[in-house]
Amino acid sequence: MTISMDVLKQLREETLAPFGACKKALTESGGDLSAAMDWLRKNGVLVGGKKTDRLASEGAIAADCVGGFGALIEISSETDFVARGDPFKGLISSVLGVAMSRSETAVERLLEHPLDAENHKRGTISECVLEFAGTIGENIVLRRLVALNVNPGVVVSYIHQSFPGTPNIGTLGVLVALESEANEDDLKALGKNLAMHIAFTRPHCVSIHEVSPAVLEKEKTFLQEQIQEQSGDRPADVQLKMVEGRLRKFFETIVLEEQDYVRDSGKTIKEFLKQEGERLGKPVRIAGFAYAKLGENSKEGHEETAE
């Protein structure tokens, strides 16, 4: 049936429910506004946003990769108890499976894909998440999707401290895209080590060239003021060298290539990659990475693609 846009907008404004939920409610209720409100209540979307406004600070992160494509998703819940239950883990695994099979890179498009890609019986992911929230009685949100794509090369996924029995589901996830024509198995092993390094060090970007000019200028100004205050009696050229030295320390904190490799202290990631490229007989470049911790804003390098 055709749903009136005016009625759809009215239901949305009065309930603050997601657009997709309002459309489904009206469809199921034959376009009747009052019945649609009842449908939302019965399916766990309370009017006035009482449920959808509740804080979903728990949940899980899941990641997977095949060849040159990898995806990482986060689905939030209100309690850790729900997140560690089999129904929730089944939901996040299914959603991740769709992201992988569709090579999807945007969460908005992922929500519109059918959860059961073969027969479409379960409806879209947006609808299924809504229905799951109603069944569980908690606010459930597909919070993010990060995808990396590289060719030639591989994308490697890593979940730190995964949930028991589900190695690809946990609370912290990393993707690493390695561009190279080296052997795929060798690249996967290398990528796994780099992913564990990223999970520990939390860099912001791959190379110095990717540090934004605004961030760089802000740090330079801070260091200049700091050194002027601490060593104002020293010559200007000495102070400049001090700024450059501390700026290198800053890069070692936020730039992946400039960091000391955690498994070989004294050797930077850039030096380690050069060494590995020589060992494998082909150059290896980090084309991108993504870091995601449950409930935090993501830190990615080349978030959508790494081609």
Image: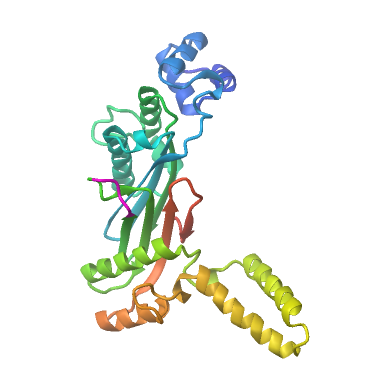
**Where on the picture, by quarter, is residue 221?**
bottom right
- Residue 206 belongs to the span the image colors magenta: no
Give how far across and how far down residue 77 sits, in percent. 42, 35
- Residue 163 belongs to the span the image colors magenta: yes
Give how far across and how far down residue 40 sits, in percent. 45, 18
Q: Is residue 234 left or right of residue 209?
A: right
Q: Quadrant of the N terminus?
A: top left
Residue at (25% x, 68% y) in the render: 189
Residue 195 versus residue 35 in the image, above or below: below
Q: Quadrant of the C terminus?
A: bottom left
Identify the main secondary structure in magenta. Answer: loop
Q: Is residue 106 left or right of residue 240?
A: left
Residue 305 shows in this picture: no
Residue 193 versus residue 241 in the image, above or below: above
- Name the residue furthest front: 230
| Residue range corresponding to the magenta coloring | 160-164
Residue 142 versus residue 3 in the image, above or below: below
Q: How is the image coloured?
A: rainbow
Give how far across and how far down residue 104 sits, in percent. 37, 47
Tally of numbered tags: 0
Give how far across and how far down residue 266 sits, in percent. 41, 82
Residue at (41% x, 37% y) in the render: 111
User: Which is more toward the observer, 46 or 71?
Assistant: 46
Q: Is residue 145 left or right of residue 185?
A: right
Residue at (67% x, 70% y) in the render: 217
User: Which is more toward the observer, 267 or 17?
Assistant: 267
Residue at (58% x, 18% y) in the render: 14
Residue 98 shows in this picture: yes
Residue 155 versus residue 82 in the image, above or below: below
